[in-house]
Image: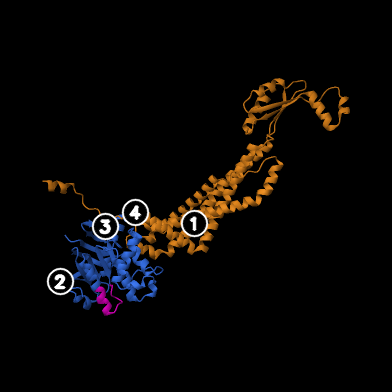
């Protein structure tokens, strides 16, 4: 009875013989494959260097655009001569009411008021026309006020304040001094979008370079792979060397891209610092940080692995001995 | 029930040629069998099906009761780890040393390096090639290459050893040595199936002989009990 119960409970074998698992074999295989891959890369250093260069350039170009974009964004944030808003009033109308109203608004750092008299005095002093102006019966210059927004204010904030000023009954003209900010912001957007497009294109390029290099490696080892499968290598074991190879191509490309960017930054550092200094902005390549470096190397490695996966998939039929 | 069973196996290729016709055979665990027949009789196809290098068009092959057709990729890999295969054209890696070639199945199985070294050297000693371990296969004679192939097949201590014309390129003395080696391996419990057309060589070994002709089994001669020897 007990015997029958055991038989009923026992499952039919799924494998011809029990799987002989060797403890630590998975880890050992990874170590061995990593070692073999390093050896493969060092033995074919010319080919490897070419792959690294291509992947490196493909990564360096969008990364450089990212640095430019980050720099522009940083620059607009640190710009001391912030753009503002000027309101010119109808003759005889005073700016005090609107000035008080604007000072209450969110995002306004200060409001500078210029009365008609002050405007006339300033004009006379600058144009040295004090005598000529003296013969005028009526002061033709309007009273005005200038709104200086807080740091980091964007075009939308300025537009909101301008709309408020336009609704004021005494306001004759409202001028938003946003040209510089808009240009920098627009350039930053262009750089970001261009970076995204170039990034996608060059990432594709990096994947293709890695895929081609890995495919060549597969072609060179096709017989070995077939023998490996014949002696019981799993699909994972067959794929593994090429994934490591792709990873090394990508990682090496990432390192090379970082080196290229570093050299590029060193070359432009002095003239760029001079240019920014003329705008009273200190040069700080803050975007080229450890985090950026980690992302660059990670992206290179990931692209390399993707390329290798594509190459292995493409040649899978050749690796199938059944 | 035999360890290996062919049930009505037919292998028909795309061009319509039937390499195996309704073959039903059973091989007991620990047995030694010679497959013989003229060139094109179906010996290699038979072994390829057993190695899962091809699938039968009809019928099924079971090993220890498991239908080989039911094995998925991972199952196939583990199945092959229990087999040792020797080919007439060796299938050696020409860019790797003799040691590396023989070590391949052990490394695939995930064995520790110190065990790999020990077992590879033991296998090379058995085939008399220990002093050649650092040489490349291309630097060896055909007979030596064949012995490297045998060392690679036996190093994993397979449950089933399969050899396709292992003595095809060898002189009679070396052929006898290799058959003796298979015999020794069979004596320690492995099932051995050897395809050979050399009737003179296998006739005197008093082992089971299965003769194929045009893809069909035409003779199945069992050894005389108590008189089997291994050359």
Q: Start and end of the magenta stretch?
A: B165-179
Vertical position of residue B165 compared to residue A184: above or below: below
Indicate which disc, 2 or 3, sits on the residue closer to the N terminus. Answer: 3
**Both labels 4 and 2 in a single chain:** no
Rendering coords of residue A135 (x, y %): 88, 25
Rendering coords of residue B10 (x, y %): 24, 63
Residue at which label 3 appears: B69
Residue A249: give its label. Answer: 1
Residue at which label 2 appears: B223
Gap in angstroms between the C-alphas marked 4 and 2: 44 Å
Rendering coords of residue A307 (x, y %): 47, 54
Vertical position of residue A238 compared to residue A88: above or below: below
Label 4 lies in what chain? A
Rendering coords of residue A87 (x, y %): 71, 27
| Residue B14 visible in the snapshot | no
Gap in angstroms between the C-alphas marked 4 and 3: 30 Å
């Amino acid at each position: 009875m007990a015997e029958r119960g055991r038989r009923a409970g026992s499952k039919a074998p799924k494998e011809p013989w029990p799987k002989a698992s060797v403890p630590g074999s998975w880890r050992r295989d990874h170590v061995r494959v990593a070692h073999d891959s390093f050896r493969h890369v060092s033995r074919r250093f010319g080919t490897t260097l070419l792959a690294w260069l291509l992947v490196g350039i493909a990564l360096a170009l969008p990364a450089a655009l990212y640095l430019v974009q980050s720099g522009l964004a940083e620059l607009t944030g640190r710009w001391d001569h912030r753009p503002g808003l000027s309101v010119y009033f109808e003759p005889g109308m005073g700016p005090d009411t609107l000035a008080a109203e604007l000072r209450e608004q969110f995002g306004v750092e200060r409001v500078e008021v210029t009365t008609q008299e002050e405007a006339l005095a300033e004009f006379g002093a600058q144009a040295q026309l004090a005598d000529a102006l003296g013969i005028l019966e009526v002061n033709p210059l309007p009273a005005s006020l200038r709104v200086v927004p807080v740091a980091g204010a964007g075009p939308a904030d300025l537009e909101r304040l301008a709309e408020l000023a336009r609704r004021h009954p005494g306001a004759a003209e409202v001028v938003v001094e946003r040209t510089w900010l808009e240009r920098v912001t627009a350039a930053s957007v262009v750089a970001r979008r261009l970076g995204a497009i170039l990034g996608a294109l060059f990432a594709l390029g990096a994947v293709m370079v890695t895929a081609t290099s890995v495919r060549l490696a597969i072609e060179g080892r096709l017989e070995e792979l077939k023998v490996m499968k014949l002696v019981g290598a799993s699909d994972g074991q067959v794929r593994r060397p090429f994934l490591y190879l792709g990873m090394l191509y990508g990682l090496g490309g990432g390192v090379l891209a970082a080196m290229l960017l570093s050299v590029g930054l060193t070359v432009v550092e002095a003239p760029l610092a001079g240019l920014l200094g003329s705008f009273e902005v200190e040069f700080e390549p803050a975007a080229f940080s450890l985090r950026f470096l980690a992302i660059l190397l990670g992206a290179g490695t990931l692209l390399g692995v993707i390329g290798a996966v594509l190459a292995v998939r493409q040649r899978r039929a050749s690796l199938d001995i059944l | 029930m035999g360890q290996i069973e062919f049930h009505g196996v037919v292998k028909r290729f795309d061009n319509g040629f039937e390499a195996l016709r309704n073959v039903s055979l059973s091989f007991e665990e620990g047995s030694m069998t010679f497959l013989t027949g003229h060139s094109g009789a179906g010996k290699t196809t038979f072994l390829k099906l057993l190695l899962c290098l091809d699938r039968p068009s009809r019928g099924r092959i079971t090993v220890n009761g498991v239908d080989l057709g039911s094995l998925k990729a991972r199952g196939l890999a583990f199945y092959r780890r229990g087999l040792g295969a020797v080919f007439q054209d060796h299938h050696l890696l020409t860019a790797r040393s003799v040691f590396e070639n023989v070590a391949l199945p052990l490394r695939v199985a995930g064995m520790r390096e110190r065990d790999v070294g020990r077992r590879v050297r033991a296998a090379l000693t058995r085939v008399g090639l220990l002093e050649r371990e650092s040489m490349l296969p291309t630097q060896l004679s055909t007979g030596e290459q064949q012995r490297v192939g045998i060392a690679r097949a036996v190093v994993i201590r397979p449950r089933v050893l399969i050899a396709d014309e292992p003595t095809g390129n060898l002189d009679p003395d070396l052929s006898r040595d290799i058959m003796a080696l298979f015999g020794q391996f069979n004596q320690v419990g492995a099932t051995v199936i050897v395809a050979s057309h050399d009737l003179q060589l296998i006739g005197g070994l008093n082992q089971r002989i299965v003769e194929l002709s045009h893809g069909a089994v035409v003779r199945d001669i069992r050894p005389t009990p108590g008189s089997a020897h291994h050359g």
